[in-house]
Amino acid sequence: MSFGVCLNNVREKSPLIHNITNYVTVNDVANVLLACGGSPIMADEPDDAVEITQICNGLNINIGTLNSRTITSMFKAGLKASELGHVLLLDPVGAGASALRTNTAIRLMKEIKFDVIRGNASEIKTLALGSGTTHGVDADKADSVSDKNLSFMIDFVKNFAKSSNSIIALTGAIDLVSDSSKCYVIRNGRPEMGKITGTGCQLSGMMTAFIAANLDNKLESAAASVALMGLAGELAFKDGLGNSSYRNNIIDEIYNMTGEKLDKGAKYEIF
């Protein structure tokens, strides 16, 4: 199945995605889901989250702005989604930056089976190794994927995918999307995307929708969503553009993306 078919399936099926996400980027997550063809809903109150999860096709858990109430909601909704066989994604924002974030993400992984874990290199390293050098919510440069360490990092994400029994999506200048045997190395995107708050959060919501609409091709659909976000970032960029306008342009490019354009513009290799 091509990346373009994955996108077309999202638009045909319009999966409803429950997002327990952070309040910094919640509006952008909703708009990106609408732009790619999905349907967003947000509920982080414990008395509401489980009921909402039951009517959805997928659950995106993002730990970017944790508090005791939302942590309770994450576990309750996550366990219900798992019981119902819904798609589950964990975005461990800032894991490695504080004990609360790190311990919550690790506990979520232990108690809930996630289809995919998506984060930057430092966050993924923290979860895989129990240590990391996360700089706030951004990856430490020492953890980044480069051509020099590419072979090592491919093996790293494959091994973590095997031990966690989840697809691992490690995103940055070079993106790696892998299960235990196959790794997509994706080179779409622009460095200016790092100046926008929440491109990763947006991607996590969109990736949940892609997997929910392509249940028989989870790895490829996860990779397709990564390529789509990066390609939109390339097409949206113009010299002199501020980061606020750039953010809006990226969402517009996702909205206007076609399956044919995605297949033509995606830059990736499979290892």
Image (cartoon, rainbow, N blue to C red):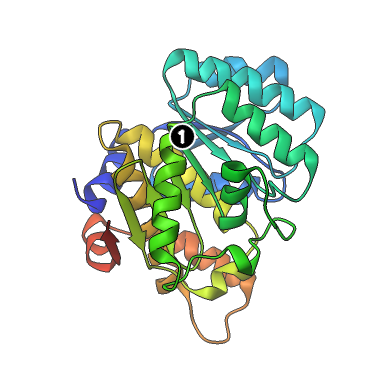
> Is 11 or 267 nearer to us in this picture?
267
Residue at mark 1:
163
**Which residue shows up at 36% across the image and 62% down it?**
186
Residue 264 in the image: state x and y as whole percent: 22, 66
**Which residue shows up at 49% across the image and 18% down it?**
82
Q: Amino acid at mark 1?
A: Ser
> Is 57 or 140 nearer to us in this picture?
140
> Is 247 or 138 nearer to us in this picture?
138
Residue 211 in the image: state x and y as whole percent: 37, 37
Judged from the image, the secondary structure of the residue bearing numbered disc 1 is helix
Residue 254 visible in the shown view: no
Residue 140 visible in the shown view: yes
The part of the image, by quadrant, that contains residue 45 is top right
Residue 271 in the image: state x and y as whole percent: 27, 56
Residue 120 in the image: state x and y as whole percent: 56, 55
Numbered circles on residues, count = 1
**Which residue shows up at 56% across the image and 74% down it?**
192
The outermost residue toward the left is: 1
In the picture shown, does residue 60 fall above or below 182? Answer: above
**Which residue shows up at 49% across the image and 57% down it?**
171
- Quadrant of the rendering where the N terminus is positioned: top left
The outermost residue toward the bottom is: 239
Does 2 sit left or right of 11 as displayed?
Answer: left
In the picture shown, does residue 137 fall above or below 33? Answer: below
Q: Tag 1: Cα neighbours inside 10 Å, few (<14), some, or many (≥20)?
A: few
Does 120 sit left or right of 66 as displayed?
Answer: left
Does 192 sit left or right of 138 as displayed?
Answer: left
In the picture shown, does residue 113 fall above or below 61? Answer: above
The part of the image, by quadrant, that contains residue 257 is bottom left
